[in-house]
Amino acid sequence: KMDPFYKAYVFHEGLDILVPRGSDVHATGDGTVLSVKNSKKFGRTVEIEHEGGYRTSYSHLETVSVKAGQRVGRGDVIATVGMSGKSFAPHLHYELTHDGRLLDPVHYLFASVTPADYANMLYMAVNTMQSMD
């Protein structure tokens, strides 16, 4: 994807979801909060461990409402969207891994979106070539 700061093509892990600042961030599955941390690149980040070796991370958060070790359910509000870290606009940076291997999250969101929304997300992920972080 095109890095908005350096104007160069770089590998961009995860998925950037543009939503208004302050929007609720929901856990995408049942699990345990593995960590809540802050970094220069990703800002405030929540990482959740799920069954079967899956982990999700949610970055560039404004506020966080969970703690490490806390159990969460699918749909629980865990944070709000922000611009913490290296961020060009308010958005959620979402990553999914399985046994440490990065996966394309677009292929795992189909259960909670309409076919039209899924097709649009897939199109945007493949064709925009622009990241928000």
Image (cartoon, rainbow, N blue to C red):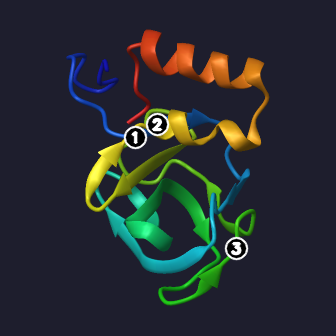
Percent of width and height locating residue 102: 30, 47
Three-letter code for the amino acid on which mark 2 is drawn: Leu
Q: Is residue 49 visible?
A: no
Q: Residue at x 70, y 65 (%)?
A: 74
Residue 117 sits above or below residue 126 on the image: below
Percent of width and height locating residue 30: 63, 71
Residue designated by label 3: 73
Three-letter code for the amino acid on which mark 1 is drawn: Gly
Residue 29 sits above or below residue 19 on the image: below
| In contact (CB < 8 Å): disc 1 and disc 2 | yes
- The quarter of the picture where residue 109 lies is top right
Q: CA distance from mark 3 to mark 1?
A: 21 Å
Q: Quadrant of the C terminus?
A: top left
Find numbered disc 3 in the image and state the secondary structure of the residue it sits on. loop
Closer mark to the observer between disc 3 and disc 1: 3
Three-letter code for the amino acid on which mark 3 is drawn: Gly
Say which label, 3 or 1, has the lower sequence index. Answer: 1
Judged left or right of residue 116, residue 45 is: left
Please tell me how crowded label 1 is: few (under 14), some (14-19), or many (20+) other residues with Cα within 10 Å. Answer: many
Judged left or right of residue 65, residue 123 is: left
Q: Residue at x 45, y 9 (%)?
A: 127
Viewer-proximal residue among 112 and 20: 112
Residue designated by label 1: 14
The residue lying furthest to the bottom in this view is: 69
Say which label, 3 or 2, has the lower sequence index. Answer: 2
- The quarter of the picture where residue 47 lies is bottom left
Which circle marks residue 15 in the picture? 2
Q: Residue at x 57, y 40 (%)?
A: 90
Q: CA distance from mark 3 to mark 2?
A: 21 Å
